[in-house]
Amino acid sequence: MNKTITTKYYCHRSGVFKSKGKGECALKITGSCKIDQCCPFFIRTVAGLINIDGTYCKTHFGHQNEIRYLPIPTIVQETIAGIPIFIFEICSY
């Protein structure tokens, strides 16, 4: 039995902005990170029992890599906001 797991990653700036709200609030100053077109960047991995194969297109089209549009992990957002983060260690007795 030859099982593989395929994972695909795409540029987070690719696509069209779709508002989830009803227009009651103003958009943020920086606007959406979406570029209203398709960016060809992708990474595709296929992991088997013995090896991992990868394919990628490193070309970004229609935008520059700007730090203001990079996603920030939740733990970093909470640290910046000053929200205490509790890490629990689970022990079995």
Image (cartoon, rainbow, N blue to C red):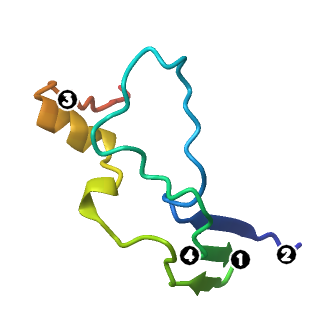
What percent of the width, then of the height, locates residue 64?
Answer: 36, 73
Q: Who comes first in sequence, dot 3 or dot 4?
A: 4
- Point out the tag, 3 or 1, that comes first from the N-terminus: 1
Q: Residues within 10 Å of mark 3 (few under 14, many from 20)?
A: few
Disc 4 crowd rating (10 Å Cα; few below 14, some 14-19, many 20+) is: some
Q: Nearer the viewer, mark 1 or mark 4?
A: 4
Q: Residue at x 21, y 33 (%)?
A: 78
Tag on residue 2?
A: 2
Residue that badge 4 annotates: 41
Q: Separation of disc 1 and disc 4 at Cα? A: 23 Å
> Which mark is first along the chain, 2 or 1?
2
Circle 1 residues within 10 Å: few <14, some 14–19, many ≥20: few
Quadrant, the C terminus: top left
Residue 88 horizontal side relative to residue 31, left or right: left
Mark 3 residue type = Ile
Query: Element type at marker 4?
Result: loop
Instruction: Answer few, some or many: residues within 10 Å of disc 2's Cα (few below 14, many 20 plus, some between 14 and 19).
Output: few
Where is mark 1, residue-wise? 48
- Looking at the rendered structure, the secondary structure element under dot 3 is loop
Mark nearest the camera among 2 and 4 is 4
- Give the spatial CA distance, label 3 vs label 1: 36 Å
